Image (cartoon, coloured by chain):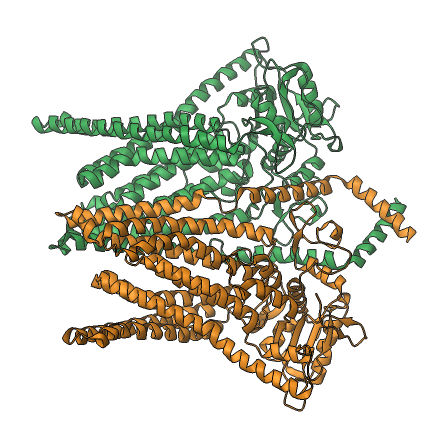
Chain colours: A green, B orange
Amino acid sequence: MRVSLVADSSGSRFTPLVVLELASDTNQDAIAWLLSRIRDQQQDGGAELLVEQLGPGVDAQEKENPNVFLVGATWQRLLSGAEDVGLFKEFNDGSMRGFTCANKHDFKDYQGDGDSFLSMAECQYIIKHLLDTLRAKQETHVPGHSEVKLYPGKSIVRRLQSKGILVQVFPLHEKEELKRLSFSWYGKVKLSLQPLDDIRHYYGEGQALYFCFLEYFTFALVPMALIGVPYYLFDWEDYDKYVIFAAFNLVWCTVILELWKRCSASLAYRWGTLSRKKAFEEPRPGFHGVLGFNPVTGREEPLYPHAKRLLRIYLVSLPFVLLCLYLSLYVMMIYFQMEGWALSVHDQEPSFWTGVLLFIPSIIYAVVIEVMNLIYRYAAEFLTEWENHRLESSYQNHLVLKVLVFNFFNCFASLFYIAFVMQDMVLLRQSLATLLITSQILNQFMEAFLPYWLQRRRNKKMMRKVQKRRTLEDKELPLAEQVRLEADMSTYLGTFDDYLELFLLFGYVSLFSCVYPLAAVLVVLNNITEVYSDAFKMCRVFKRPFSDPAANIGVWQLAFEAMSVIAVVTNCSLIGMSPQVKAYFPDSESQLILWTVAIEHVLLAFKFILSFLIPDVPKPIQISLARLEFESLEALKKKCVSEPVMLCGLLVLQRSLRGG
Amino acid sequence: MRVSLVADSSGSRFTPLVVLELASDTNQDAIAWLLSRIRDQQQDGGAELLVEQLGPGVDAQEKENPNVFLVGATWQRLLSGAEDVGLFKEFNDGSMRGFTCANKHDFKDYQGDGDSFLSMAECQYIIKHLLDTLRAKQETHVPGHSEVKLYPGKSIVRRLQSKGILVQVFPLHEKEELKRLSFSWYGKVKLSLQPLDDIRHYYGEGQALYFCFLEYFTFALVPMALIGVPYYLFDWEDYDKYVIFAAFNLVWCTVILELWKRCSASLAYRWGTLSRKKAFEEPRPGFHGVLGFNPVTGREEPLYPHAKRLLRIYLVSLPFVLLCLYLSLYVMMIYFQMEGWALSVHDQEPSFWTGVLLFIPSIIYAVVIEVMNLIYRYAAEFLTEWENHRLESSYQNHLVLKVLVFNFFNCFASLFYIAFVMQDMVLLRQSLATLLITSQILNQFMEAFLPYWLQRRRNKKMMRKVQKRRTLEDKELPLAEQVRLEADMSTYLGTFDDYLELFLLFGYVSLFSCVYPLAAVLVVLNNITEVYSDAFKMCRVFKRPFSDPAANIGVWQLAFEAMSVIAVVTNCSLIGMSPQVKAYFPDSESQLILWTVAIEHVLLAFKFILSFLIPDVPKPIQISLARLEFESLEALKKKCVSEPVMLCGLLVLQRSLRGG
């Protein structure tokens, strides 16, 4: 499993797991202090980790940052760290339990103090946690950097990150395992499923859940795609058939989202993240404020008044978002003018080229939408950063909300306008198809191939440099070069953008399904290539991310459910507007609308009842969880009742103490 | 605090807290065995409680049950029991913490081993818990009753209850405190609030939360009532004003329900039930099945297949409920025929008596509705019992669902019919008023005055009997008579019916508020008398109930919220149907309907967003809870890290052991 070893200052060799890069102008005192704090024993408040400076690269004459450090740990430290972070591992009896050093021998894969019990991703996560929870003692500031204040009991690493001294912390890739994973994942064109357990082993639960969701979503769309194909092949233009398709679509959306919860619970149970307790959350690196006393911990630390944050949210962020929505509407209106102009040109002198011209406005609009989404994304990140949220989770929630609302509006406003104001179903279908296809192509290009191309150029440059120095036989880069190469790779920013893309695709499929049944087919095709391009970018383009012990897809479950509720409303309205349905109510339009609304309400009520009736966690896992809870209650009861037993235990300990 | 003491068989005197009544034909072996199991030491698997047979009453010659037992406990036992049940008490620093015997001196009201730390209700709850968790050891059946099988590790008391050997278990009233409580509660006509803390002290958190909700609900309706009065006084018949009223109503309903959550969380925090863990739930007394192994505990016990229960629910209960709903519709149709007949009589020869006749069908219908609700209630209880749910909570959920759906349908179907099919607003208002007033009068009569009258007759009879024997100077009944008198009182069946009544009243106020603004006034008036009659029935009519450590009003919060969602739909429709609103859309009815539906959707979305935005727990309590969690995490961390400290502790203990 391990490839390269590094010698510690004390001479002992260790496997480097995590890289710390400090700014190149960091004071040497600060470096010495930080390293000693990382190496210190736990009882002295240190992290008790192994750390060593990375040697110079082959082209040391060039301007390169010397302050790159490799961090590792002994097996004992990793095991006690696993207990600290509350890692769940498989127990002898097949259930998942919180790991404790005391009964480590009762865990299934534990063999001596050896390898293969903790995966490298888990080791890296543990080291990250230990670094993050390395706390300031009595130091008032970082030695040599008097401007960087420290507060007793607060995380040192987070502080250094906020102040720009710590440039980045990232886990190292594992060449051999990565090669094996990438081969089984996307190396061959195959019909089998993704190697989810291997992905989880290498990237952690958060990543694996995303890829599982992507796969699940693709398979869930297959029935819809299969039903959609004949509509395209046989030109089924009558609405009767679309009504059937939409009805199936609505029920299907609800069912797949409910079943996903069960599927995700099963996976999270198998991976041990379902019942894992959340650790106490530290403030995020960028958080700043006036010194005060934290009402929860009672410690002195920077505080930021909640009222001030609310003012920033409601007086700046909210108006800004509304302005952006207005802008988006404005752009939409320009698009409709272009569309009208193209149509008038085509009507005057219809030719092949004017026929092509008809599609141009939609394509331009699709590109503009993507560009606006991108710019808005940066603005939203800046604003949410500026709102100065104390916790990462609250920052994420506010960011997701901002981005979600705008992207939804930006992508679907024109479709809503065409559907319900212009009521032009032909244009709706054409617009939907153009938007969907253009955004798919752009996304694939932007998110995988462009970064890959940039990365490949960098790789080649590095290879050439290395080969200039010495002739490599095994074509393997030496550790120092490998680390520097990975340090230069782009940082993977989490699953946010990937989920957002799926969310918008889900919108294209579900919102207006009854006018364009082929959408599901396109999304299925897109998802299949998406699996490959996402896998590729994870393996080849980005730095390895730290694993994230997620138990579910979090706020995205809610977002997808909200979309499926909106889909009920839009589909019912589209059906109500169809000429075939109108034909049933020749005399009274109000009767038609009332019936449509009534059916919509019944469907919504049905959705809610269904989501109550289907349990979120499958029965066998409910039983396992209840059994664990029962056992811990029983153990607690025994502990409470049997004071005599405790005394017995004490006497035994007494004896062993004397014996020792 | 204590009034009467009873001598134990060992001669020590104790305060009787709980009464156990066994069937009069119980075998003496069984009684002796049960008493010894209750008295046994904890390490022998007993409950370690004090128990004594009740002496014969003054008229022992009469046929009275001799198998009545009084149960009490020593203070030590009550304190260790308080730890077992996970009671939360106020700590020295003002926060609420789980009580432990080890640091009992750090709790605020703890003074030596004396009174006033645990309330009598808490003591009784602890004794009930200890009795309930008294488990069978190796006994295969109850001695002397070979038909009553026992399973190792299962509750003895529940088994005896299922088999009818244990007739009832109830806590004793406390004459002095009850007198004081009832005086401050309903003894004087006053403008002050209810003594909620005293109610909680005497009856426990579940009861106190109900009375708090009743009070909150009443105050919350006052603004609506105040706005409603001028509509009645000035005969504001135009719909413009009703629209304003309905809009206010909708927002108000959402806000009060959200605020109630916060209010309830504050109370539950103050009373220590908010963060209290639920104990592992035992099967309910009536549960039966074939012997098998429980997948959770691994113990042998009766099991009942889930599939069989689902069959009973979907093939018997569901059709039965649907049949009842149909029956209710049928009765409704008869009512409309009566109504039509009364109207035709009045139209032919209008006189004072035919004017009165107009109200007769509504009154009869209201009475019939109440009677049907009552009968259905029994049927629902029988069916839910027959579905054989394993846990009390699942039994309660299924019962509540059945009763709620039927009562909602039964009470409001006619109003929906009048409003949306007949579209007769005058009849709707008249019907609503009659139903509301009749059901209020009937309820007050049925739930308080009738039981009180029956109870008074019994009391007087007992008094006369006692006075026949000896002349009482203090007019106090001796203990034996008091216990037998309480044993004969009706059993309070929980807050179910009380909440159901409030739920229906809430429906009358919110569903059709815009046609009858006076409803809020009537409900406020009703609630004021309801406080008195409920308080009266709790103090004078019913056996004292065991306290129930509830943290919220549970499923009723959901029920009230569902009602407020339905209210949005009905009120929007009523407003859309009003002539004033129709006048804005003279040409197109469909435009009107579309606007109504759009506004309805916006309101619903607004409701959901509002319920997300308002946090369920007030900020200060969130902080207290976070602080407790932080402290326990810190303590845990210290425990994990500081093995040396533990060794120190051991050495200290060693020394103290040697010293002892």
Indicate the position of residue A433 as horizontal and vertical percent values: 25, 36
Q: Considering depth in this image, is B271 or B634 the residue closer to the camera?
A: B271
Q: Is residue A626 left or right of residue B416?
A: right
The quadrant in which residue B520 appears is bottom left
- Residue located 38% across and 49% down the image: B252
Q: Nearer the viewer, residue B224 or A82?
A: B224
A504 left or right of A648 in image: left
Q: Quadrant of residue B633?
A: top right
Q: Is residue B248 visible?
A: yes
Q: Position of residue B453 (x, y in %)?
A: 50, 78
- Residue A51 in the image: state x and y as whole percent: 68, 25
| Residue in the image at 41% along x and 65% along y | B404
Pick out the residue farthest to the right: B659
- Residue B630 in percent (x, y) is at 64, 41
Which residue is rendered at x = 25% and y = 39% of the image?
A416
Residue B216 position (above or below residue B462): above
Q: Is residue A37 left or right of residue B546?
A: right
Q: Farthest residue in the bottom direction? A: B61
